[in-house]
Amino acid sequence: MPLILETIVTTLSAEGALHLVPFGLIRGDGADGKETYVLAPFRPSPTIENLGANPCFAASSPRDIRVIAGAVTGRRDWSTEPCQTIPGRRLADSFGHAEFEVVAVEEDAQRPRYHGRIRHLAAHAPFIGYNRAQAAVLEAAVLSTRLHMLEPAKVLSEMSYLAIAIAKTAGPREREAWGWIEDKVAAALGPEARILDREDRGTRQERAE
Ligand SMILES: Cc1cc2nc3c(=O)[nH]c(=O)nc-3n(C[C@H](O)[C@H](O)[C@H](O)COP(=O)(O)O)c2cc1C
């Protein structure tokens, strides 16, 4: 399996409107042996439309995991800054970001692949360590974009497992992000998806007994 980096990708529409969504960038080798990263959006996709109009994108690593959970639950108004080498903007509060020019496109009816060559790479904040709750929010965010593809029982069992890391290690931002994902999954699959709510209620009940 190639390395896949989970990032916040920003693209510009023909009219100059910014589109901000999470994507996994797949590391690959360009024809000349230079490293490329492949962006592979499923159709239909505003990102695909935007890349047709402006064949470049920025990829940022968010410091606040709510950006990833927010972007897949209708909260896309996060602060951005202008890119250095391409038209467009990148997420402001990020550990780092890369700016890409699309150098090749593999057309596909379902999932075209855009090969990006790095034009600019920058670090913005020190990265000291991983956090389990952030990783759990990231995984739950991915699940929440695949509700139409996955069995409800699988989604619920994965959410139950991920909730353990949230209960043990989340700060207020991760709790809030988890709540947004639970709301989305519960809207599709029902109240069974409110795992932490249920656990909290269970704990309160245990204390009362
Ligand atoms: C961490 C993460 C990685 C994702 N990676 C992809 C991906 O590689 N391809 C894709 O089509 N959707 C991916 N998604 C789902 C998209 O973010 C979501 O469907 C988004 O709306 C697609 O962008 P669009 O609005 O331009 O179509 C990912 C979601 C998350 C949370």
Image (tube, grey):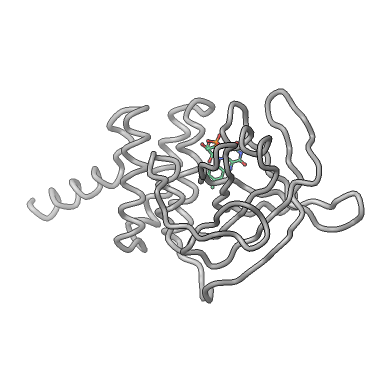
**Residue at x-position 81% and y-position 57%:** 35
**Residue at x-position 68% and y-position 35%:** 52
| Horizontal relation, residue 38 to residue 61: left or right | right
Q: Position of residue 205 (x, y in %)?
A: 13, 48
| Horizontal relation, residue 128 to residue 50: left or right | left
Q: Position of residue 1 (x, y in %)?
A: 74, 48
User: Residue lying furthest front in this view?
Assistant: 15
Number of dots carrying numbers = 0
Between 168 and 128, the residue placed more toward the observer is 128
| Horizontal relation, residue 39 to residue 6: left or right | right
**Residue at x-position 43% and y-position 57%:** 79
User: Residue lying furthest right in this view?
Assistant: 32
Q: Position of residue 60 (x, y in %)?
A: 57, 58
Q: Looking at the image, in which quadrant does ligand 1 appear?
A: top right
Q: Is residue 132 above or below residue 187?
A: below
User: Residue lying furthest left in this view?
Assistant: 208
Q: Position of residue 157 (x, y in %)?
A: 43, 38
Q: In which image quadrant can residue 3 be found? A: bottom right
**Residue at x-position 54% and y-position 46%:** 22
Between 191 and 116, the residue placed more toward the observer is 116
Between 175 and 89, the residue placed more toward the observer is 89
Q: Is residue 2 above or below residue 129?
A: above
